[in-house]
Image (tube, rainbow, N blue to C red):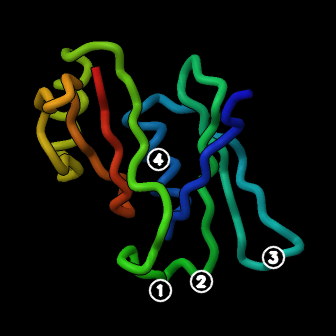
Amino acid sequence: MNIAHIALWTRDLDAAAQFWRRYFQADVGAIYRSERRPGFASRFVRLPGERTSIELMTGPWIAHASADECVGWDHLAISLGSATAVDALAARCAADSLLVSPPRTTGDGFYEAVIATPDGTRIEITA
């Protein structure tokens, strides 16, 4: 078994795609527009060397959704492979006001920082 994809709702499909492309060098697929569910659109992104993809999804009903009212995944953790890579991406995200928590070693021994997508979804970047 393996995870085929993970789905994230976004208010701005283009901004979300640009985020994944800019900070993670993700390959971003073409926009899919549903004929069955008017207004629904999605794009799949795939990180370099990764089999699992991330589906970015949007629809007009998302514009008014409150993050406080959502139940589901809290964050996604992406291993960058080294503390140097975590520090570098954290610095880039800090410059762009996307850093939530600076690099640190957690109590359970992980070296990580927390960044946010344009919609505020948290991503742990780990060594």
As drawn, the label of residue 14 is none
Question: What residue did someone put label 4 on?
Answer: 18
Question: What residue did someone put label 3 on?
Answer: 37
Question: Mark 4 or mark 3, which is nearer the start of the sequence?
Answer: 4
| Dots 4, 1 in contact, CB < 8 A | no
Residue 77's image quarter?
top left
Q: Position of residue 76 (x, y in %)?
A: 42, 43
Image quadrant where one finds the N terminus = top right
As drawn, the label of residue 64 is 1
Mark 4: secondary structure: helix
Question: Mark 2 or mark 4, which is nearer the start of the sequence?
Answer: 4
Q: Residue at x 47, y 81 (%)?
A: 65
| Amino acid at dot 4 | Gln
| Dots 3, 1 in contact, CB < 8 A | no
Q: Residue at x 88, y 71 (%)?
A: 35
Q: Distance between the residues labelled 2 and 1?
A: 6 Å
| Dots 2, 1 in contact, CB < 8 A | yes
